[in-house]
Amino acid sequence: MPNFIDRRLNPKDKSLGNRQRFLKRAREELKRVIKEQVKADRIIDVDAAHGVPMPTDGANEPTFQPARGSGERNYVLPGNKQFSAGDRLPKPEAGGGGGGRGRPGTGESEDDFQFVLSREEVLDLFFEDLELPDMVKLSLKETVLFKPRRAGFATAGTPTNINVGRTMRNSFGRRLALHRPKETELTAIAEEIARLEATPELSPKDRQRLSELRSELNRIERRRRRIPYVDPVDIRFNRFEAQPLPNANAVMFCLMDVSASMGEREKDLAKRFFVLLHLFLKRRYERIDIVFIRHTDEAREVDEETFFYSTQSGGTVVSTALEEMIRVIEERYPSQIWNIYAAQASDGDNIIGDSEHCAALLREKLTKLCQYYAYVEIIDERETEIFGSTDNGTALWRAYRTVDGEKANFQMTRIAKPADIYPVFRRLFARQPATRTRK
Amino acid sequence: MARRATSGLLFQGSDWNFVTLSRAYDAIEQVALEEMGLNVYPNQLEIITSEQMLDAYSSVGMPLMYQHWSFGKRFAYEEHHYRKGHRGLAYELVINSNPCITYLMEENTMAMQALVTAHAAFGHNHFFKNNYLFRQWTDAGAILSYMDFAKKYVAKCEERHGTAAVEAILDSAHALMDQGVFRYRRPPRLSSEKVRERARERLEYEEQTYSDLWRTLPQTAESRDPADAERDASERKKVLNLPEENLLYFLEKHSLILEPWQRELLRIVRVIAQYFYPQRQTKVMNEGCATFVHYTIINRLYDQGRIGEGHMLELLQSHSNVVFQPDFDDRRYPGINPYALGFAMMQDIQRIATEPTDEDRDWFPSIAGNGDWMETLRDAWANHRDESFILQYLSPAVIRKFRLFHLADRASDRFVEVASIHNERGYSAVRSVLANSYDVGANQPDIQVMDVDLLGDRHLRLQHNVKSGIVLEEGSRDATLRHVRHLWGYEVSLAGVDPQTGRIVYECSTAKSA
């Protein structure tokens, strides 16, 4: 009979530790590859598992290997069909096939295999070194986050927090001090009684002994009942104190132009930008408020679903979005407590005369309220050539340029094709040197 | 067709449970021990999931292994191929230990479990217990506790010295794993502590027997002619036991910069390399033996009416998958399939022993027609490794069956030449070339420590004996040499020498490449 052992319920992921070590080792290279892939692919793909080629730098394992194409070798191969001794076969040009196939090996194919990173690993690599700049307003007043911290022992608490070690130590001390009869004493007496009872003829001495034993047993039992093994007074609980954590309140405003001038392509680019931003915020900042505002000739605060998926169109008055934002700030996010960020995407078209109004709103109000304001203009690929990086551009662009020079916490940039999105995103949210002067 | 009893079936349907598993095991054991006369370690069968199988794969098939990133890389690699369906997982995995541990996958059908039990728990197990290489070089009873020690020791080192420091040593040690085995003698059993103990005892003895009178003897005049220098060199080579083929062993014992824990890490890697060395030399025999055993056992059980016809078909199908040998020009050709070659040769031995032809009588006078095929096979399994087994037993019949031919490939020529094929003139050439290709020792670069002047510049000199002009791949050679330098602490140079002419083929050194 063999020894069967069912190992199926053993803990899984025995090699998880090895995987993490490997990832750490290949981190730089994996990061580069993922960025390239995301640049080429659709941005939305960042939110999924990725296959990447096996990294070679830092993860190769050199050994002494015989060089190919040197010296004399002999192979024996199966399946001869037409060869006879003395036949000469030309070697294939670039090595590989022919004679080289005599070597079975996994080593050769190892280069072209894909290594799958999970969604979490992708996002971690992808958003490394990005952060919201200038998150300075830390508020303790509005704390909602507490971290339990061990703080000694208590005599009251929930059963889950019982500290068994402490409790049993107390119980042991109490039992010793009060001379609680031991289990062994009890059984010894009970056994002797049983023995005496079993003897058919009892001498008077034995009879007296038996009654003594019985009363002794009675006494011990009562005493054991009176002094319990574990008394409520023994019980100790681990005590936890709620420690408040400083809380950085942050809110991100996403402003998107959905007017008729924004074609399918422009909307798609803008949405991709916001998807990336959204992912980034969700990943790096667990508790951040995101306010979605979309505008045509009127602006409305909407939920995430509507922002990304619903269609609407109309004329364009950009300042309505800014006003809506100011309204929401005044209503819900006082700027003394909140770190406020905003990202605006538009094709730059605006109703005549409104752009200056927008610039004024920005300069006077929003840049003062916000930690950081990013403006992304979606332009046609042909326009990149015309505009370049000059001050030239749409009305809104030209108006914003005036703000750009003045305010350090205002950034503006252009996106012409999907591949631009990630670099632009990185530029906007790259981790800043610690001393960033504001105003 | 003869009517077969169906009442004695061991199992029905494809689901297994522990009752049917152990019923099948008992029947298999009966055939294996009583009819085939196998001699096995006690068995321990463990049921695991496919994920656990992947885990076991990536830790070189050991149930316990220390942590290292390269295993993570291997896991990713295996998982990738498994998920893509490029290759299935092995149905079993067996560990050369006492008790012999066999992993059975939970996904297997009952019939497969029976096949796997016969294959691993009896075939491989018998081979592990009886083959001379395993008996000589591995200690089946101690390997699991050693792996447990190794795992804990590495974890402890990581805790104390940091993961990076441990990884650096292990990386370097892994690079030299192939050069970390003893090929020709039993590994010394002494641990580094024991060696220190010995040295201390010797010193004490010298102190006790020290006589001041010796000091007063007149010294010979200092004369350093070349002969003296040579004598010095040979003297110090003798002290260090040079030349030494086991680089890891040499570094572990003589490196000047390693801390004791680093030496112990080298030792762990070296012990594991040594443990697997016999397996690498007996792939064909080991798999052939296991395949032959399972084939014989399931056929016997079928004849006894204890395996149903449906199950038999399933088993034969997977058996023929296992022993499938694609031709060299087939896209699926991965090299010669050790299962196919081993199984074919062993079946052939059975045939030669029972129904020999005249050709067999010429080639194998000692075993042809001796009738006792099982004894002949047991003897072959016990006393050969792949190279000698093929050299001794590969018959013309098998060469013809596989249509083997021999290609000679000289780097200087623009063609490869078919040197011999499966005909009367070619049999022995094909046989010896094939046997030679299974000689692990001959096919691996032969690199030895030649000399080091511990009192001088401590430059470590390695020598590569270049066989048939095959040099080393330069990129990996230099990288590996840097690993040697990392463990040695001083400059290292490697010279490729043609052993026939003594001519130096190439030279490289960490001093130049750094």
Image (cartoon, coloured by chain):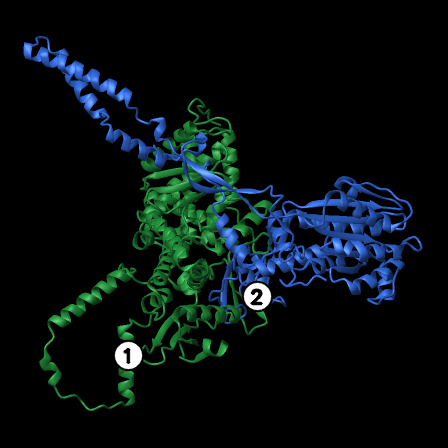
Chain colours: A blue, B green
Q: Position of residue B96 (x, y in %)?
A: 37, 47
Q: Is residue A385 left or right of residue A97?
A: right
Hey, what amino acid is under mark 2? Asp
Reply above or below: B22 against B192: above
User: Residue under mark 2: which chain is it in?
Assistant: A
Q: Nearer the viewer, residue A240 or A396?
A: A240
Mark 2 crowdedness (10 Å alpha carbons): few <14, some 14-19, many ≥20 = some
Q: Which residue is mark 1?
A: B234
Reply above or below: A191 against B103: above
User: Residue under mark 1: which chain is it in?
Assistant: B
| Residue B377 in view, yes or no | no
Q: Residue at the spot x=24%, y=18% of the render?
A: A221
Q: Position of residue B122 (x, y in %)?
A: 37, 40
Quarter of the rendering containing residue A56: bottom right
Hey, what amino acid is under mark 1? Ser
| Residue B259 in view, yes or no | yes
Does dot 2 land on a helix, a strand or a loop? loop
Mark 1 crowdedness (10 Å alpha carbons): few <14, some 14-19, many ≥20 = some
Quarter of the rendering containing residue B101: top left
What is the spatial separation of the Cα atoms under label 1 and label 2, in whole angstroms? 50 Å
Q: Position of residue B48 (x, y in %)?
A: 46, 38
Does dot 1 land on a helix, a strand or a loop? helix
Q: Position of residue A195 (x, y in %)?
A: 14, 15
Q: Nearer the viewer, residue A158 or B307?
A: A158
Q: Is residue A436 left or right of residue B436?
A: right
Q: Residue at the spot x=37%, y=65% of the render?
A: B248
Q: Nearer the viewer, residue B316 or A216?
A: A216
Q: Nearer the viewer, residue B263 or A83?
A: B263
Q: Which residue is mark 2?
A: A87
Quarter of the rendering containing residue B40: top left
Q: Is residue B299 left or right of residue B136?
A: right
